[in-house]
């Protein structure tokens, strides 16, 4: 009945298979490698409770009134100090997902091209498709020359087709879903290409501060601050429920985003911004981050060793230096979409790797596995169960 | 430098003159009839503080995790009971402004027509323009026949031009900016026309529960629930800073909004939803609403009597039965946009009435006055100051 009323954009809306899983089963009742949920054990409930008292005492009614569209000054100040970025380059967003959405909204017309790594974050692909962008995925080639060549070819093809490449979307640290991190050299290649071919880069960086080994690589933003919109988030380092993220970028770009946000939601949640500012400014977030990193490192190590022990020959996986995910590749011909219901019936969930690809017929023998959400015990039992099911399937 | 990257939608973005005022002056330091801010005195700080403890104790980590895109079940349940609407007809939004934005996004293509009362809410006009809708404004005629005729003519003109009328946007209770309320007969006319000419109605209802005199008129939604999307909000009845609103509507419409919201922000702020549910479910919101209504009624009465006493002849204003605003009309030829800087220099702010009109050259002799934000004393001093300035100007 309502079909005739819907906008053309709606014909390109994608449903999140992950959220559909959430609707179907209670994640707590199964072994779930599916979501990207942080562990509830990392939420500093007692600190948050004390912070609510402090914020109410310190700011009173101001913490519940409308606030500035750019974000409350106190939070922007703390972000400015933490990340060494001037205030006029900081826009607070109502979740980092809104950061993706608003960047796409102000930059992309139907038919414009967005370049992304393949696989990539599902929520970003959903947003890009919802604006009827043409999304071009580039697979991650291991050598630097092949990496550059793959991007150059993709860009040249876009230009040859007479289309506009608006931006490259990239999660350089502990990518979702692959778990991989781009080297400094790879980042420099992307910046070089952005300048040569005149496009922007949207750098999505929610996991950056969750590093379990190795050394930080500079952000793409730090290498080229006028061409990069850098998206940050409290979701993985504090708690997702606050829905607070931020964008770093050139003032002229942020100004357009600011005007857009006036009609999107006027301003981000105020109380939550003050809580985030209080927890970050007082050092409680950093103290909690140390604990989160230790917890997640132990879970990652456990998952890696369990896969090594229980997965049959022919199965391989990435080794993430941080973040929440690794990507598992099964023997050619294994179909993780067809296998999914069987796994769920047996009580274990993952997300099929195809869903993260621009072309969903690709990579049907892959899956994303999350290691942040479950307890050590459930990770152990879950891997044993999943590996057993895979073995039976491969027979 | 970035112009070439921006989407076509951005050419239609409007800046909010109200938010630009906020950037320019500290509202606390002047007499401000400008914003639509609730009084800080209505925020039940002590109840909120206690509710934070209860929510953290009751829900623990769940209150800070990702939640369902439709909203947390506990809040939807409380809304369902309060408004007598089944769960599947309730979608929680991250602010009521997002409700306007997401309805427009899923319904409107560039060039589609949205019908609205003229004047209308600025944030809605901003959202409509940002999607390059064609907005047609209809002035409020006092007699029912003229009311119907004005809408029929506007609708027929849209059809004659071969354009698609997607929806009518209406704030039927204590309209922003006019303060006026639609009668039951007027609402029935709108429903009749929506059915006859096959369009939807977006009913924006943030002020409905702030009634200071007279009796409730049924919502348009209650008269025609399958053709109306009803927008509600905690902003004026609890606190805007939570950014929590809701949409009531047909499940098929809400399902499209749900998919859209997956890419907008995944889910509304969780802690804030639990706080709203706790305050609403425990009766604290209602108790606070009784106090808010008493406070606002006294401020409205004060403003009305001060206008009567101090405004020069030839100035008239609406008599709102509720809400936060009245609309003031100055003698023909008075230009409230030109006068604005003079008033602000003298320390008093309002919003020029033209800004609420689809055609901003209209109604240059009008202004919107808010009476919720300032104290009684500041309202009194502010009206005296403003009336004095107007008198000088009229000489």
Image (spheres, coloured by chain):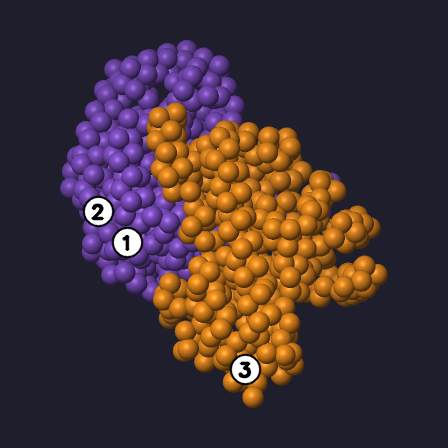
Chain colours: A purple, B orange
Instruction: Say which quarter of the image contains residue B346.
Output: bottom left
Position of residue A237 relative to residue B98, above or below, is above
Which of the chains bears the disc numbered 3? Answer: B
Name the quadrant of the C terminus of chain B: bottom right
Q: Which mark is residue A281?
A: 2
Instruction: Say which quarter of the image contains residue B216.
Output: top right
Classify residue B61 as left or right of residue B107.
Answer: left
Name the quadrant of the N terminus of chain B: bottom left
- Read off the residue under disc 1: A74
**CB atoms at circles 1 and 2 under 8 Å apart?**
yes
Position of residue A322 relative to residue B374, above or below, is above
**Residue B81's spot in the image, x, y percent?**
60, 30
Position of residue B38 relative to residue B328, above or below, is above
Question: Secondary structure under badge 2?
Answer: helix
Q: Which mark is residue B391?
A: 3
**Residue B262's spot in the image, x, y percent?**
49, 40
């Amino acid at each position: 009945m309502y079909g005739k009323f819907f906008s053309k954009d709606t014909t390109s809306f994608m449903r999140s298979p992950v959220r559909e899983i959430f609707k179907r089963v209670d994640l707590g009742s199964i072994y779930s490698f599916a979501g990207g949920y942080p562990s509830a054990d990392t939420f500093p409930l007692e600190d948050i409770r004390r912070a609510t008292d402090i914020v109410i005492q310190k700011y009173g009614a101001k913490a519940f009134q409308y606030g500035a569209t750019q974000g409350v000054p106190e939070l922007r100040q703390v972000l400015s100090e933490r990340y060494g970025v001037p205030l006029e380059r900081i826009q607070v967003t109502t979740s980092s997902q809104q950061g993706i959405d608003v960047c796409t909204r102000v930059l992309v017309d139907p038919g414009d091209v967005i370049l992304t790594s393949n696989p990539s974050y599902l929520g970003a692909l959903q947003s890009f498709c919802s604006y009827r962008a043409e999304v071009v995925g580039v697979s991650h080639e291991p050598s630097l020359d092949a990496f550059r060549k793959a991007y150059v070819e993709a860009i040249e093809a876009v230009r040859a087709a007479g289309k506009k490449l608006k931006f490259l979307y990239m999660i350089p640290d502990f990518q979702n879903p692959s778990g991989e991190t781009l080297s400094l050299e790879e980042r420099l290649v992307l910046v070089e290409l952005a300048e040569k071919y005149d496009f922007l880069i949207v750098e999505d960086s929610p996991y950056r501060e969750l590093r379990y080994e190795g050394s930080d690589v500079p952000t793409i933003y730090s290498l080229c601050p006028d061409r990069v919109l850098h998206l940050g988030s409290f979701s993985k380092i504090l708690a997702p429920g606050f829905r607070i993220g931020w964008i770093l970028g050139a003032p002229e770009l942020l100004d357009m985003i600011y005007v857009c946000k006036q009609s999107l939601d006027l301003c981000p949640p105020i109380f939550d911004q003050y809580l985030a500012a209080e927890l970050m400014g007082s050092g409680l977030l950093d103290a909690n981050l140390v604990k989160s990193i230790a917890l997640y490192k132990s879970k990652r190590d456990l998952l890696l060793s369990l896969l090594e022990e229980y997965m049959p020959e022919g199965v391989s996986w990435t080794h993430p230096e941080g973040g929440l995910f690794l990507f598992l590749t099964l023997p050619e011909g294994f179909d993780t979409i067809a296998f999914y219901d069987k796994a769920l019936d047996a009580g274990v969930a993952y997300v099929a790797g195809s869903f993260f690809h621009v072309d969903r017929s690709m990579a049907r023998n892959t899956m994303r596995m999350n290691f942040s959400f479950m307890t050590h015990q459930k990770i152990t039992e879950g891997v044993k169960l999943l590996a057993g099911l895979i073995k039976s399937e491969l027979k």
